[in-house]
Image (cartoon, rainbow, N blue to C red):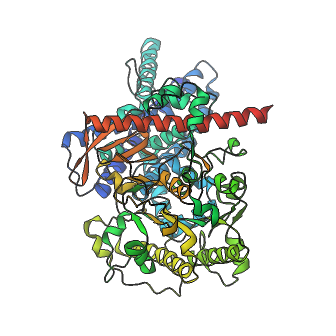
Amino acid sequence: MYNDSVTLSRWQHWRELNRQLWRLGLVGVASLTLMRVLLWQLNAPSTLDVPTGEIWQAFWMGMRFDAKIMAVLLGPWLIVATALLPFPRILLAGWRRLWLVWAIAIMVLVNLLALINHFFFNFYQGPINSLIFGLFEDDTQAVLETIWSDYPFIPLLIALIGMTGTQIALMRRGRRHARRRLGWRRATLVVIASWVALIGLGRGTLGTFPLREMHMSVSANAFVNDLVPSGPEALYLAWKERQANRIGDDPQSGLARYGFSSPMAAAEALGWPQANSPQAVLDHMIETTPTLPIAKEEPPHVVLSVMESWGRHPLDFDDAEYNDLLGRLRPWVKEKADFFPHALSSGNGTHPSLEGLLFDTPISPLTQSRYGYRQYSTSTVLPYERAGYHTVFLTAGSTQWRDLDDALMRQGFDDVLGESAIRERFPAAKGSTWGLYDEWMFRYAEELLQQAEANDEKLMLVMLSITNHPPYRIPEHYDPAPLNVSRLGDELAVSTELGTSILETYQYANDSMGRFLNHLEADGLMDHTLFAATGDHNTRSLIQYPDGHDLFDQFGVPILMWIPPAYRNGGEAQVDDWTSHRDIFPTLWAHSLSNAQVPWMGRDLYTPQAAPMALTFNRQDGGRGVMVSDAGAATRLADPTYYRWSGDALQSVASPSRALEEQTQRARARMALEDWRIRREALQADAGAAD
């Protein structure tokens, strides 16, 4: 590799390695900056209106973080080289030979993460976050097939090779060996200067406090802040977030994070005067449903359908004649059932939302860890199991996805059924990458309800659809109703072709659910069946949500409710209230279970409430917890960022109104207590397993 490596002195080897290291570091920072420019140009919303100085500040801060990453990745190589200076020359020469291999490996990693961050941003409307670990926790083969199908894999591979080759060539360009002796004093100064510079860049500063995540907040605009972390830095932050979600060994760590010294302090913020001990707080976190005589005489079936990527925002562009996004679901949304348009998902991914819905946990993933081997008191299915219901989880995908089969059976489900069970019943069932088309799941669900009727059995059924997921494909036999993606206008964030595919699967999923409800109605089941449907998260890719002014769209999902008149107990749907996933099961419990003990969670959507709010576990503005209400909004509830309403949009505000501040404090207290409850149970289970 180096023909003159035998004749070069140890010092000359060190100087050449030092020169190449600094050149490569500079090239790396320049490359990441160019990727940031590309991200800005391709993803900036048309409504972005921020001072130019904030954009420059985002780029400057981003370059500082890029330099920190490059120093951390490359610096150790120089440290070892310096440590080898007193030893025989052959050791340093060998170390320098390995340098090229290390340099190539590092730049492949940096470039790959930069490219991944670019496409992750397009899909999730933000830089890499902990959802990326779903590559290993989801069906990895299906994820890879989706990537191969939906992204230009070969061109990206060529780009990766080209970027890395160019960077290494620039690093080695003009290679020279300084043969002039500097003397030990000047040589020592060069070594010290290089080390000090590396340490300074690695810390982000030579001052007292290093460069940290808090310094990424350079603007009140979330999109501008999202420009700061490059791919490598974003992955590092995602890993930190992942580690922060570990249970740890202190059940009160979540309470402390949200600013409460004890569960009693959080209970006091909620106005629970009798909650003067941890046990009293826990007792307060168990509620009893209202008296409902008909539920005792004729218990209803209960069905919840969690629809993949069923975001609310696309429905703003629905038009029965020209852009039909509902199909046979239209009468149920518009006339028959109750539609709640101001709802937010509990998480921003399928599994976090599913755990939020079924366990009310801000800690996710919960069931995939060692803490998943116990039953949690917050399981939303347990009240039905205790009431004698047959409880079933049904998905059009694999029951082994995220270990659903094992995890859910521990939480009160009698059966966990998926693609294989549906295929056994319907051998002609067709599907795509992630499982069967939704119509087959709904057909199987119809038969489960008919069988329950025949056996005089009470059925509690939770379903998870999969069709409205990339790669966006509909069955060959399905003839879409009229669609016109141009109706989205400037809001469309993808090509017309991809946008049309997304709308087709969106329509198909809704149409399949509408067909299911029509069949239940025709079979006479809807007069004693409670039905709820919601999305697991928003509709990916179709529309961009770059900042906090549209939190309600970024995390917005529909909630569709059908409570038969006989089971309403005099209640009236509060369809104009702000709500979330956390209110679905409390509503179902209130209208299907009489005087039953249930976990404290959300509220009954058919009972008026003063100052209702949508509270979710979503992460925004660098922290967990999002609250939206008529008073405004707050994000990262541990250290709130406040927003006020300006027409139909949210604008950040330094001084919140008293109503918003009080509502945010209640939201923080709720999050803190829910964290404490689930963390406490997880740690108790872990201690029991250890014993």
Q: Residue 294 in the image: state x and y as whole percent.
A: 58, 64
The C terminus lies in quadrant: top right
Judge by depth and name the residue closer to the eye, 647 or 126.
647
Q: Determine the residue positioned at 61% across, 57% down.
A: 138
Rendered view: 645 above or below 689: below
Q: Residue 148 in the image: state x and y as whole percent.
A: 54, 67
Tell me where residue 203 sits by quadrant.
top left
Rendered view: 48 above or below 670: below
Q: Determine the residue positioned at 73% across, 45% down.
A: 373
Quick one: which residue is furthest to the right in this view? Answer: 691
Q: Determine the residue positioned at 48% across, 39% down.
A: 237
Q: Is residue 51 left or right of residue 412?
A: left
Rendered view: 407 above or below 335: above
Tell me where residue 334 sits by quadrant.
bottom left
The N terminus lies in quadrant: top right
Judge by depth and name the residue closer to the eye, 321 or 446.
446
Figure label count: 0
Residue 3 seen in the current view: no
Judge by depth and name the residue closer to the eye, 219 or 31.
219
